[in-house]
Image (cartoon, rainbow, N blue to C red):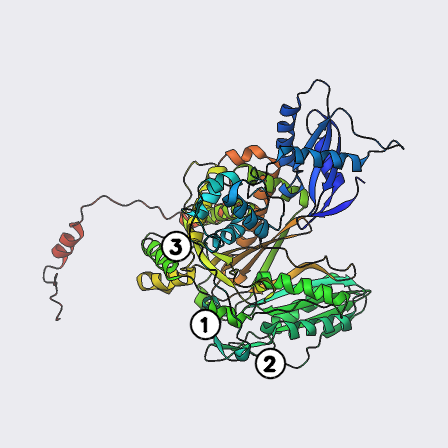
Amino acid sequence: RADQQVKVRGHRIELGEIETALTAAPDVTEACALTLGQPPRLGAAVVLAPGVQPEQALAVLRESLAQRLPEYMIPTSILPLERLDLSANGKVDRRALAARLDALDAAGARTPPRGPLEQALAAIWAEVLGRADIHREDDFFLLGGDSLSATRVVAQLEPRGIAIEQPLRHLFAHPRLADFAAAAKQVEQIAARALVADRAARHAPFPLTEIQRAYWRGRTQGLALSTGTRYLIVLDGAGVDLARLEAAWNLLIERHEMLRATVEADGEQRILPSVPRVTITVDHLDEAGPATAQAVLDAVWDAAPSPTVQRWPGHWLHAVRYGERTRIGLCIDYLLVDGFSVKLLLAELARLYADLDTELPPIGVSFRDYVLGVRPTPEAEARAETYWRARLDDLPPAPALPLARAPESLERVAFGRREARLEPAVWARLESGARAIGVTPSVLLLTVYAEVLSRWSGGGSHTLNLTLFDRQRVHPDIDAVVGDFTSLAALPYRPEAGTDLATRARAVRETLVEVLEHRACSSIWLQRERTARLGPDGAALPVVFTSTLGLPERHGVAPPCDFPALVGGGRSETPQVWLDHQLYEQDGALVLQWDAVEALFPEGLLDAMFATYTATLARLAEDPAGWARPLALDLPEPQRRMREEVGATAQDIAPRLLHAGLFATARRDPARPALFDGER
C-alpha cells in the first residue's frame, strides 16, 4: 500500500512520501514505490510521459529526488514503464512490479564486486554500513557513510591484508567502490588485535582514559569554569508504569558495569561487584501541564551537587506525575558513558520495559579490558605527533566570542540550553544538498556552525574542539559495552574571503580528513603542548561540536508504543567549556542543541547566534542556489550598533615627531633625570 510504513537501513519510511516525490519530478505521470529483497532495499516503477526518452528522464528524476528526499529514501532501482502492472481487480500489482525490478537488478543494472579485493572491501562496507547489497557502482557516502564510519572502514584494512596509501583521504576522494578498490593492494595480513577479557580482575582499580581524566580534573574546585559532567535526558508519556521502569533500570545496572563504577580521589576508577537497588523519586502535581512538570525537573537538576569525586550512583531518575502523563528525568554522569552508550541504554531500557524477562545477549568484554588493552600503535602516535608539532605555533585560537565577564570570575557555572528541530522534509533537503556538493551532512553543519562563530568573532580563523566516537573493533561484543570511548580532536577553521559555502564546506572536509588521520594525538594533548607557549587561557579550546550522525544503529527493535518518548528539556554541563553544539536525528528530524555558560556572554548574544544558525540552515534547505554563494550572516542591528559604539575610539591626534615630547620635557625641567642605570 502507498501508506505502508517500512523500515529500510534503520529508517522508518512511508512509501507514499516516495511516490509523491517521484510524481513531482518532470515527465513522471505515475509511480509506485516498493521494498525489495532481504535486507530490504527501495525500488520504484514509474510511467513516463509519451515521447520521453527513459535514459534522459531517469537522470533528471534522480536529480529531482536528491532535492526532495534524504539519500536513504531514494530508490536504488527505478524501472520506467509505459503503464503500471495491474491486478485482476484493477489495483497496482506491487508483487509483479517487485518481480520485474528484481529481474532488472539480476540482469546487471548494478554489478557485483569483481575480484578478491573488491569483494573484501565490499564486505567491510557491508559490515560498517549494515548493508548486504554492496555493488561496484555504490558510493560510500550515498549509502549513508559518514566520517565516523569511514574511519571504521580504514581501521579494518590492515587486518584484512589490504593496503591503500592515505586510505581515509582516498575514500573521501574516490567514494565509489570500484574507484576506491582500484588503489588497493593485497599485502601480508596483520592479525587483528584481539581483546582478551580478564574476568578475574574485573573489579580491580584501573586508570581513567585521557578524556575521563580531563573531565575529572576539570571539575576540581578552584579552577575556572569548574563544574560537573552531567547529562539529563527527559522522557514523557501517558500511562507510564514507573515500577516497571524502575525494575528495568535496575536490570541495566546489573548488566552494565560502568553503571556501577566509582572514581576515587587518586584518579583510579573501579567497578563495584554489587550495589543497592536504585529507586525513582516521584512528585505528584494536580492540574499541571508539561511546563510545570519540566520546571520540577529543572529545579532537581539545579539543586543536585557536582561532586569532585565520583561516588556511586553516577545517575538518578526523577518522575513527575501530572494528570494522566508522567515526565521523567534520567541524569547520567558522562564521566562514565558516551553518546553511543546513552543510545544503547535507552534502547535496552525500552526493551526491558516492554518485557522484564527479555533475554539480552551476554557481554563478553569489559570497559576495563578495553582501557587496559587498546591504544594507538607507536607508528600512529609518532605520525600524529609529528603532524601536530609542526602546527603548534600557527593553529588559530578558539573563537574570540564577546564575553560579559571573565571565566575565572564566575562563582557558579550554570549552563542553559537552546534547542531547535529541523523537520524531516527540511533535513532531507539539507542532506541531499550536502551530498550534491560532495560533503557529509555533519561537515555541512560543522561549516555553518563555524561560519556563525567566525562572524561573531570578528570574521577570522578559529579552532573548534570535535567530539569523536571511535571505539575500536577489537571484540565482537564491543558495541554492547557501556563506557566513555570518546576522544577530542582540534579542527582549525580558516575562512577564505569571497569563497562560496560549497567551497568552504569542501575545505572543512579536507581539514577533517587530516585531523582524523592524525587523531592518535588528541586535542587534550595539543592543548597541553600549547600551554607552555600560550598559557592555559591561550591554549584552551572551549567551543565544542558534537555530532552523533553516523553512529551505528544496532540496538534492535523499536521501543514499545507505551514507552515514554524522548522530549525537549534535557541539559548538560562540561567543565572548562563555553559552548557545546550537540546534534542528533530523531524520527527522521534533526535536533540541534546549544549548551552554554549563560553568564559568560552578553545578554541576547547566544539567542542571536542560535537564531542565525538555525535560520541559515532552513534558508539553505529552501534555496539550493545559496550553496554557490558566500554566506551572508548579518549581525542583529542592536549588536552591530553596540560594536560600533564600543569601537568608536577614533580621535584627532596632532602630528609630531617621536622625540618631540622628550625635548619639550627637557626645556621645561632641564635638571630632571632622563636616563636611569637600573641600580637607582
When asked about the image quadrant of residue 138, the answer is top right
Measured in 3D between alpha carbons, the distance from the residue under mark 1 to the one under mark 2, in whole angstroms, is 26 Å
* SS type, badge 1: helix
Amino acid identity at mark 1 = Arg
Q: Specify whether 95 is left or right of 113.
A: right
Please report the residue visible at 68 percent of the width from the left and 77 percent of the height from the top: 278
Amino acid identity at mark 2 = Pro
Q: Is residue 39 visible?
A: yes
Q: Is residue 608 visible?
A: no
Q: Specify whether 595 is left or right of 9.
A: left
Q: Nearer the viewer, residue 624 or 355?
A: 355
* SS type, badge 3: loop
Q: Specify whether 316 is left or right of 381.
A: right
Residue highlighted by disc 1: 217
- Residue 397's disc is 3
> From what the image shows, is residue 327 above or below residue 17?
below
Amino acid identity at mark 3 = Pro
x and y percentages locating residue 272 in the rendered image:
58, 80
Marks 1 and 2: CB-CB under 8 Å?
Answer: no
Residue highlighted by disc 2: 273
Depth-wise, is mark 3 or mark 2 nearer the camera? 2
Depth-wise, is mark 3 or mark 1 nearer the camera? 1
Q: Earlier in the sequence, mark 3 or mark 1?
A: 1
* SS type, badge 2: loop
